[in-house]
Image (tube, rainbow, N blue to C red):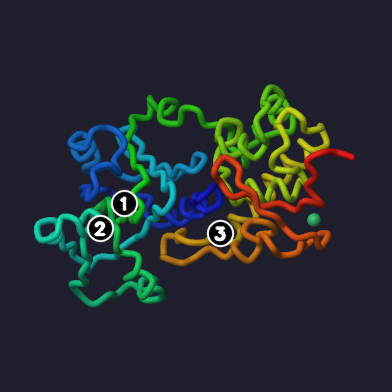
């Protein structure tokens, strides 16, 4: 699942690519991808909106649109965004000929003219693989398209008026890379919480944008066992955790995100942070700090990786 670094990296790519473009129309190939408002309203409201900016909030991508509206994109498990240059047509005939296959694969993209875009040529083979499972397509007035592909179909796209921003992001905690994310804030936020610290990090309510990969990495960096109850952390540990969260997220962004399975950037490229993780999916390998074998346990139905020597459950 894309976490803060992957979403931030995509936001930066999008900012350099589509700010200033205008959405001519949206084509929705899987209705449930649109979470707000109802589909007919969504299709009517999105027309002729100018893309004025690209932001990120937690794991949400946020496109600022003209007329005081904004679009949120949450990729969940397998959602990805791609820019398609002009010169392609979308074949939707599968909807009539094989509705079951349509429900899985979505439309077929066909090239109509010679491709002039060097960025596209560079990764065209990846692109062809990525064009399946398109759920929503934004046609831009300049002929390009912004595609949302999502094999598992858990991703959601929503359109909101700016005045309802609080509602759109209800329950999201502070941004870990903002000035609000201080040791004092984290100390106060964890004080009343008895749940395991890893669960608290995943819940998004204290701090937004952290998922399974970066939670495991931050706890390893801070030498905190993932099952420790949040309110048991010492002030020294909270300080290490605050620093650990910031540093693993910054490193993730620097490396273009972590791709284990599905995450791809705007140009279909995998992120490089896979080569820089210390515990996530490293079970069975020796800890880089102490040589002890990294373990994997299940916590709240998620796999959790840690070093049993560096990250102790009880203090001695
Ligand atoms: Zn260790």
Label 1 residue SS: loop
Q: CA distance from mark 3 to mark 2?
A: 32 Å
Circle nearer the viewer, 1 or 3: 3
Q: Are marks 3 and 2 in contact (CB under 8 Å)?
A: no
User: Is residue 134 shown left or right of residue 187?
Assistant: left
Q: Nearer the viewer, residue 159 or 49?
A: 159
Circle nearer the viewer, 3 or 2: 3
Disc 2 under 8 Å from ligand 1? The reply is: no
Q: Are marks 1 and 2 in contact (CB under 8 Å)?
A: yes
Classify the position of the C terminus by image quarter. top right
Of marks 1 and 2, which one's residue comes earlier in the chain?
1
Image coords of residue 191 (percent x, y): 71, 24
Q: Residue at x 35, y 74 (%)?
A: 124
- Label 1 Cα crowd, 10 Å radius (few <14 / some 14-19 / many 20+): some
Q: CA distance from mark 1 to mark 2?
A: 7 Å
The circle on residue 258 is 3
The circle on residue 1 is none
Residue carrying label 1: 21
Image coords of residue 148 (percent x, y): 33, 53
User: Is residue 262 shown left or right of residue 145?
Assistant: right
Q: Residue furthest left?
A: 96
Q: Residue at x 64, y 52 (%)?
A: 250
Residue carrying label 2: 142
- Residue 190 image-quadrant placement: top right
Which quarter of the frame holds ligand 1?
A: bottom right
């Amino acid at each position: 699942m894309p976490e803060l670094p992957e979403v931030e990296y995509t936001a930066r790519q999008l900012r350099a690519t589509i700010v200033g473009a205008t959405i001519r129309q949206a084509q929705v190939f899987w209705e449930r991808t649109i979470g707000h408002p109802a589909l007919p309203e969504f299709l009517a409201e999105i027309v002729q909106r100018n893309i004025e900016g690209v932001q990120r909030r937690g794991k949400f991508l946020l496109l600022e649109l003209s007329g005081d509206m904004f679009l949120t994109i949450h990729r969940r498990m397998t959602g990805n965004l791609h820019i398609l240059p002009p010169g392609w047509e979308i074949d939707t005939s599968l909807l009539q000929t094989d509705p079951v296959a349509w429900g899985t694969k979505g439309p077929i993209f066909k090239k109509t003219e010679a491709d002039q875009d060097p960025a596209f040529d560079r990764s065209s083979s990846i692109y062809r693989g990525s064009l399946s499972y398109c759920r929503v397509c934004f046609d831009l007035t300049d002929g390009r398209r912004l595609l949302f592909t999502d094999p598992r179909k858990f991703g959601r796209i929503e359109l909101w008026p700016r005045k309802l921003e609080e509602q759109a992001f209800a329950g999201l905690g502070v941004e870990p890379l903002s000035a609000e994310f201080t040791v004092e804030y984290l100390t106060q936020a964890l004080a009343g919480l008895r749940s395991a610290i890893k669960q608290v990090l995943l819940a998004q309510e204290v701090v937004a944008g952290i998922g399974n990969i970066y939670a495991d990495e931050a706890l390893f960096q801070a030498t905190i066992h993932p099952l420790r109850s949040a309110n048991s952390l010492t002030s020294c540990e909270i300080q290490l955790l605050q620093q650990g969260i910031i540093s693993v997220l910054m490193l993730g962004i620097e490396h273009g995100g972590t791709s284990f399975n599905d995450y791809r950037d705007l140009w279909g490229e995998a992120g490089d942070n896979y080569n820089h993780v210390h515990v996530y999916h490293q079970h069975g390998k020796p800890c880089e700090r102490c040589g002890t074998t990294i373990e994997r346990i299940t916590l709240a139905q998620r796999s959790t990786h840690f070093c049993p020597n560096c990250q102790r459950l009880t203090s001695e």
